[in-house]
Every structure is written in structure tokens, then in C-alpha cells.
Amino acid sequence: VLAPGPGEDHETDRSLSGAQSLLLAGHVAGATWHYDTVTIPSSAVAGVPEVQYNVAVAGNSAANNTFLMLHGFPETATTWMWDVLPEFERQFGKDNFQLIAPDLHGINYTDPKSEDIQFYKLSNMVDELKTLVQQHYKLDKVWLVGHDFGANLGWYVYYLAPDMLNGYVALAVGPLKYVGAVEGTGADPVWTAAGDYRDAWLKNADFWAFAWLKNLTVTPLGVEGHIPERDAAWQHQESLKYQTRWYAAGAAPTKALLKAIEDSANRTMPPSGFIAGSRDPILPIKQRVCCDVSWFGDTYFQFADTTHWIQHEDPQAVVTFIKNLMNGGEMLQKLPDFCAAQPKNMTEHCQANLAVSPLPNHETIYQMCEKKCPDATRAVQDCLINNITASCVLDYCEKEGEYNMCINQHAECKYLQGTPLREYAHENLCALSKDDLKAVEAAASHHINPSSPTSQVP
């Protein structure tokens, strides 16, 4: 069974494919989990109906420490069960913890699969998670762990519902006050270039999702291993399409969140930690993490020698960090201490003012490249980001070699070299036939345009 449904137990030492076996090699074998189905009543917020959560649960329900695990894109609840669960068992012992990992809105077996963008706004999920923890599982407080979009959601929970937390560890996504300062202005060219795929998915979520579902031989964003289960989860009720709704809904801090962040300075908050991948191409924080230490507050910080998929690439580092945070953080560093120990060249490229672009004449990365490679720049912006169609993708892919040659030979285009968006276009879109692209376009056209709602709500 590729994507077992609720109620079935799972073991990490079951019969596996070669790729899966390689990933599990060295981990504790025999870890088991099961799925619960938990119904959360409808919210008072328009567009947020009753939600039936599919929750992967592992460990001992009587243990003193329970961890609420929030997955990111494009993964599911079981992202925590393959690699992190065996490491929890190794470091904590099988009976000394419990993991609760829901499939989040629209994903895998969690229902409904809503077309309403309001349903995917992070602020609307906080109370649901509190109800899940406190009313269904009868827990006063939990430890929280989140990755990617789950880490974004985790920061919302941390600031809006701190009373339900013993502490929080975010993977790949730092405190939202920091992320908002960097991403909100578009003034950091490295960050902007790495994140232009987010603009593309915000404006054309369905097209990209259906394109992936047409071509499951590729591995979006480097998510390796456990491929049969992953593919089945993405195909279940077109789950992957609804995951791209998270990008359409946006992750910008809401006014309520910004106020909660401000108010947190005057209250005792749970301990928090942030682990970043030092080789993360999607959220390239290494080049500027020590530029903005004031945005991190009292958050503990650590680099892992990984890309974006920290929990898969180094689960030992993740669980060790969690355990150290639980023990008071004596073995951890806060960001100012971390940065004080780094070489000076780590901050020599910091932009003095993130309100404006540091590029010549305060240009954007596209304006700078357009002087040398106008056709390539316009193709990326007009097609891949702003208004993707089957015909423009076919044209882009036909000329991709020509575009690459121009971009790679001009310094003015250095920020557009090898961006995640262009890599995704090459690996996925350009691998599809004309008929497949037309089918993707037709499927996307039958659904609500996800780009119209704003990314900020009161």
C-alpha cells in the first residue's frame, strides 16, 4: 500500500525500495506510528469550515514530553516518521516521548480540499492546532517543531498562542520579524533570486502543481526518498495542488502577528530555537544571518551542514538541538554569540539599508540583467512568474539553452544564474510534452485564480 489510510500502523523497517532503504540505513529500526482522525469544528472566520485532520502519532501517550510536528511544502505528516522518529527513539528512549504530526490544510488525508484561499492562511490554523492539542489530546502544553511552511506556521503559534507551548524549534525558517524584514523589501538580491519561485507559485499555483503531478519522475525541491508513499500522497485527491495554495495565500506576517511579536518583548516567552541549513539554496540565510542579529531576539541558533531538508539530511542534529533546548540551552548559542565567533568576512557583504536595493541605481535583479539579456529576463518574468501558459513554456524551453548562455556569461545576470525557479522549470516543465502542457493548462484553468487575495489579513 503506497499511502496507507487512517487507522493503519506503519513500521520503518517494513519492505522498502532501494532509495528508501539507503535513507533509513543507520537509524533505529522498528519505529511504529499510526494515524488518528480528528475533527476540529468550523471557525468563525469565513472560508474556514470544519476540518478533519489526519494525524500521524508515534511514541508513548503517557510520556512527559509531547512534540507537535508541523511539516512543510511539499511534504506530509510522515516526513517526521521516516528519519526523525528513529532518532527520537535513539536519544530519548521509546517510552519517553510522543510525536503528533498532522497533515496540514488540504494535504494528503486531511479534509476538506478547499478552493478558498482563506482556508490556507496561516493565522487561521493557530486556534485549530490549539484545539487539536488541548481538547483532543488533552495536553496543556507541547513542544513545537516546524519545517519550511510548517516553521512559518510554527512562528504564528509561538507568538499568538505561547501559552500552549513548552518551547519551539524552527527548521529552515527564522523568526518572522527577521524574514519579513529581509523578504518584504525585495532589497536583498540573493534572497530575491532564490525566492522568485514563491512569486511564481503565488500567481500560478495550479499550473505548477498539475505540472508536477504530470511528471512524478522528477523530485521537486530535492525531496528524496520514500518516493512511492510521497507520490501517492501528492496524487490523493490532487493533494499537491492544494499545497500550492499555501503560497497563494501568502506567509507575510499579519497585523495581529506583528502586534503579538511587539508585545512579546514585555512578556515571558517559551524558549525558541532556529536551525538553518548552511547550504540551503531556497532560503540562503548564510550570507546575511549575522547582518541582522537584533531581529532574532532570544532565539537560539545553529547551522546544520545541510541543504533545505534538515530533518532528512541530519536528523541527529535536529533531535540533539531539541534536547539541548529542553535542558535549558546551555549547550546552544544565541545569534549574537554565534556571530561574535565568526570571521569578519561573514558580514562584509551585508547591505547597510534593506529599504532599498544595493544594486546600481537601486535596480532589481531583473532590471540589471535585462540590459544584457532582455529576452531571457522577460521570459522568466512574463512567463514563469507572472502569467504562465503552455505556449510560453514551450517557447521558453525551446530557447532555454540560448537564455542560459546569455545569463551565465554576463556579470549583470549573476543573480539569475541557477535559481530554484529556473531549475524547477528545466527539470519539470521542460520535461513535459506539448500535449501534457496543454493538459496542465486546461486543468489549471478550471480552478479559482489563487493570485487575487492579498497576502496580509487583519
Image (cartoon, grey):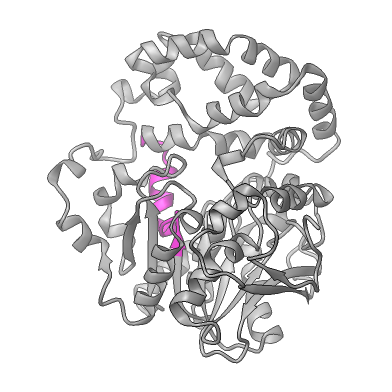
Image coordinates for residue 265, horizontal then vertical, percent: 34, 73
Q: Residue at x 40, y 49 (%)?
A: 306
Q: Quadrant of residue 322?
A: bottom left
Q: Which residues are magenta?
A: 170-188
Q: Is residue 242 above or below residue 6?
A: above
Q: Nearer the viewer, residue 285 or 306?
A: 306
Q: Is residue 307 visible?
A: yes
Q: Residue at x 73, y 56 (%)?
A: 107
Q: Residue at x 84, y 51 (%)?
A: 237
Image coordinates for residue 376, horizontal then vertical, percent: 52, 13
Residue 25 in magenta stretch: no
Q: Is residue 379 above or below residue 198?
A: above
Q: Nearer the viewer, residue 366 or 303?
A: 303
Q: Residue at x 61, y 52 (%)?
A: 20
Residue 179 in magenta stretch: yes
Residue 289 is left or right of residue 26, and the answer is left
Image coordinates for residue 305, horizontal then vertical, percent: 35, 51
Image quadrant in which the N terminus is located: bottom right
Residue 27 is left or right of residue 441, and the answer is left
Q: Quadrant of residue 333?
A: bottom left
* Number of numbered discs overlaid on the protein picture: 0
Q: Is residue 452 above or below residue 439?
A: below
Q: Nearer the viewer, residue 368 or 31?
A: 31
